[in-house]
Amino acid sequence: MRRIAVALILMLMPASVFAAAYLYDMGSGDSAIMDDFTRVTDTSAFTPDAGFGWDAAAGMKPYVQVYDKPIFNESRGSDQPPPIYTNALTEDCVIGSEARSFSIALPAGEYSVYVLCGTSHNQRYQYFDFDVAVGDQVRTVRFEGPYQFRNLRFTAKTDGTPLEIGFGPASKWVANAIMVWDAADGGATEANIAELEAQMYGLPPEEMEKWKLSPLPDTPPFPEDALSRHDLFRGFVIYHKPYLECIYPNTNPYAHELNPTLRIFATPGEYEPLTFAVRTLSPLTNVRVSAGDIGPIKAGTIDVRHVRYMKVRPNYSMFHSYHIAPDILEPFDAMDLPADESHRFWLTVQVPPDAEPGVYDGSITFSTDHRQQGRIEAVIPVKLRVLGITLKEDPSKLYGIYYRDPIDSWVNATDEPSKQYFLRKAEMERADLVAHGTRNIVMSAWCRPADENGQFTADWTGLEKKLELNEKYGFSPPYVVSINAGGVYQKYMKESPGSHLSRVKMPPQEYFDEMTAMTRFVESERVNRGWPEFLYYPIDEPSTQETSVKYMTELMKAVRAAGVKTYVTADIAHDAFGPMMPYVDVWCMQPFSWDRERVIRESAERGIEFWCYPNHISGENDHTPVAGARMTYGFGFWRSGYRTLIPWIYSADVGDPFNYLDGSSMDFMNRHDEDGSPMPVALWECFREGYDDYRYVYTLQTLIEQARAAGRNAAADKAQQELDYVWNAIDVQLKYKYDGLWAPEEFDVYRWLIARAILELQEAV
Amino acid sequence: MRPYVVWVLALALAGCVWAQEPVREGEMEKLVLAAGARPEVWSVAEATMASSPEMRKTGEASLHFHIDVDYFAGEAKYPIGWPRASVPFDQPWQQDWSAFDTLRLWVHSDTSRDALPSTPLGMIIYTPDKAHSFNYNMGELRKGEWVRIEIPLTRIANHDQVTRIQFAISESDYRHGDVLDFHIDDICLLRYAEPHLSDCRALPRVGYSDLRTVKVAFRALGIPGDGETPATLSLKSGGDQLASLQVGVSRGTNTVPFELREGLSDGVYEIVVQVGTAPPAAVQIRLVSSPWAQ
């Protein structure tokens, strides 16, 4: 199969083209070599006879991992695609921890140089941070772990002495291939590199052929009549749609959306999206977006991003169907835009906590190169109303999230720069979580099954660090912690219980006794170390099969026997889970399955809590149900009566984090930049807007109570009337996603109705 | 069999295939997609499908979808499974629903339980495959009642390439031993025979009083052909007409930008849509002074 893949690549890359170039494929002594390339290993020291090689054969090691066919997934019981598909260049690499240079003997002349850096080998705890230098040109390469490949381009002029390509690591460096060719003769080589990159950043041609592209959504006709001569001259129009309405490449504006004034309102300390879109009439180059001061908001604090289109799957586990959708909010300095496409720019502003109430003006400038004027710009006016309101947070609610904590990589990283990177990333992500209203994460209190003496041992280095950071960033317990129920099951049953307990059999009583003992051990560690409250989470999403429920019932009973609270991800609306009811303290389910009245009644009568993990708006599908996300997080949450939202997941990568078609499933939610800083998807920003909606609601509820206590009943009644108006406008649903939602522009108006009532009530009180 | 017999049968079959014409039912035209007389065309798993002349809503018989919820039977890997029944739509007139407005069917539910769960029965419409399908949970079903299910075809993407319709339950929504009897009748497509307006909405329904343009979305039904029909939109307050707009609208969903006049005060306004001879439709819009008003 590997040979077939190599052969296919070779068919696309005529040997005669590459033959004119100097081509080196880094790897081991027996890994595959791309045709026309020369093998380079960690022992390939430079000699004049060879005409290429390292300055010293030390401080390097080759790594090989071939991915050329599906892999059997034991848990799922089926073949799954590999994380990436490799070729002869990407399946192997040389990784170095010392500064090294690679020399190539060349005739005097001018050359183009292409260096490919990445690894298919599972270097999950490695942060690559290094410089590549050719002459005085230096490029810095930074990325985390495997499955990502960076390409670097240089120009070089030689006088007959060997060309040197230097690798200088801050942590470690990695190289897959080096290509050098005559700068005047590169057209065909460029074409072959383009083919290589299409496969490397997408899928191999024979795989891609299986994927069917779905059409873009319908859009209104382009308002040709509304175009001015100036629009035609500059080659674009600026327009605005509410950010809860997705913009696709083919989206056309309505005439009334052209040349907008952007208007937002916010309270001190509050974040707010500020978006506009460009519909190009001709190709635009060197596009830049900059913001000036907007009243109290200083230009330098405004986050400017472009909404990147991605190839996405309709559902995370689906194969061979994809479409183009708006996705990542990517930072940029300058970019080119093709003709006849719409692109949204997403700015995020935060009103300073000490900002004075009032209406302020500002502007955003969109600029691009212009064939006649050199540079042309459009100024978009901005109006900001700062409200004299301090938003309150409902202490009875909790916003959490499932989370792959970089601290786990921090524990396992072997070099200091990688350790620093993962720690920094963990801090930046926690800061981002808090900035989005989320102050709780799911963690693990994993320990080995009991030894022959019945004793448990655990390494709490990671958990201790996580809890320390959580406290530093003001997180709110209780924390859901998974425990090693699967490992103890394996000990007694000598097999895995399977995905969602699909193969579970009833274990002996000793198993449940050990689970009680393990829980007691973890809980005693928690108490002794002064850690916050845990909710014990032994199994994720048990199935409704009889043995599964019987096992879960005994397991939850056993865990609870340790005097702790239990947590399960199961839909209480499924009658099959009924036997578990007495032993579960927190039911966490995907939809708002039970209505508000029942949730409140059952919570009061049985003392159980109802949490929700709304996968339908957190990356289970594509990242477009933005209005559903805001409704779920704000007005819908308010209406549900549930205590907590805790979606799967802040970020999860499968294969290349910027390729959603590779791997066994689509990547989930937010991405991160090369320095580890969060790169959000629009959904994540809409979580925050929903969170803010609920803060407005709660602030008004609190004020109404205060007004009544102060005897201002008429004012309280008026405010309550407005709150009821919003309440009644909600079309209550189990899952807010696309249908039955408010129009995108209505969300802010409903929020304003509440804000206005707050302002009036503040005056009255 | 003699050749001419084959030809006669083939012609008769072709007549069945191509002669499917809608029939008038009140102000609607109706095309039956599947009826109770032919249960044998359904593929059924972990359940039974039979013709039921005794329990019917419209025609000669309904389809009786019977399920004994069994946590231990069915597929070995998923004993708590998904009893289901599906029928392929392989004729062009069954596959292209674009000339119609609504999918309608009737479902009667009976069960050994006291009441149905919140997800009692699901319907999946393949457009054209499972990866591109429309899923509908019939949460509105009630024990012992005939319930009409009506789904505007605007909600079903790719409804011009329907290849299959399936009904299914998830046994996990029920208890072991539950007995379910769904009677499904008159699965049909409907369209208005005369001009008619539906699903009229103002976008937004609540907005700032300096809002200059409101989008009015509605479905114009019963309009023949691909042409346009004149329509009038009027903005009214307390019986006074404040603004109006003449436009041409076509069959199906229309979204018309409607210019409001300046200087509107806070309050509730009415937008009236008149299309051809259709009864007018009215929607309300509430306007409130904006946060930026000085």
Image: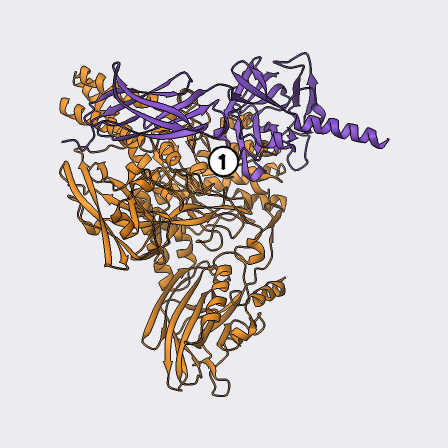
Chain colours: A orange, B purple
Q: Disc 1 marks which amino acid?
A: Val
Q: Secondary structure at mark 1?
A: helix
Q: Residue at x 46, y 33 (%)?
A: A590
Q: Closest to the observer: A248 or A686?
A: A248
Q: Decide: is A490 above or below B217.
A: below
- Residue A641 in percent (x, y) is at 38, 25
Q: Decide: is A453 above or below B214.
A: below
Q: Chain of mark 1?
A: A
- Residue B141 in percent (x, y) is at 54, 18
For the C terminus of chain A, give its image quadrant. Answer: top left
For the N terminus of chain A, give its image quadrant. Answer: bottom right
Q: Decide: is A177 above or below A396.
A: below
| A354 relative to B130 in the view: left or right | left
- Residue A103 in percent (x, y) is at 43, 80
Q: Closest to the observer: A698 or A522?
A: A698
Which residue is label 1 attached to? A559
- Residue A43 in percent (x, y) is at 50, 78
Q: Closest to the observer: A579 or A18?
A: A18
| A96 relative to B145 in the view: left or right | left
Q: Decide: is A146 above or below A293.
A: below
User: Does residue B143 appear in the picture of this structure?
Assistant: yes
Q: Quadrant of residue A698?
A: top left
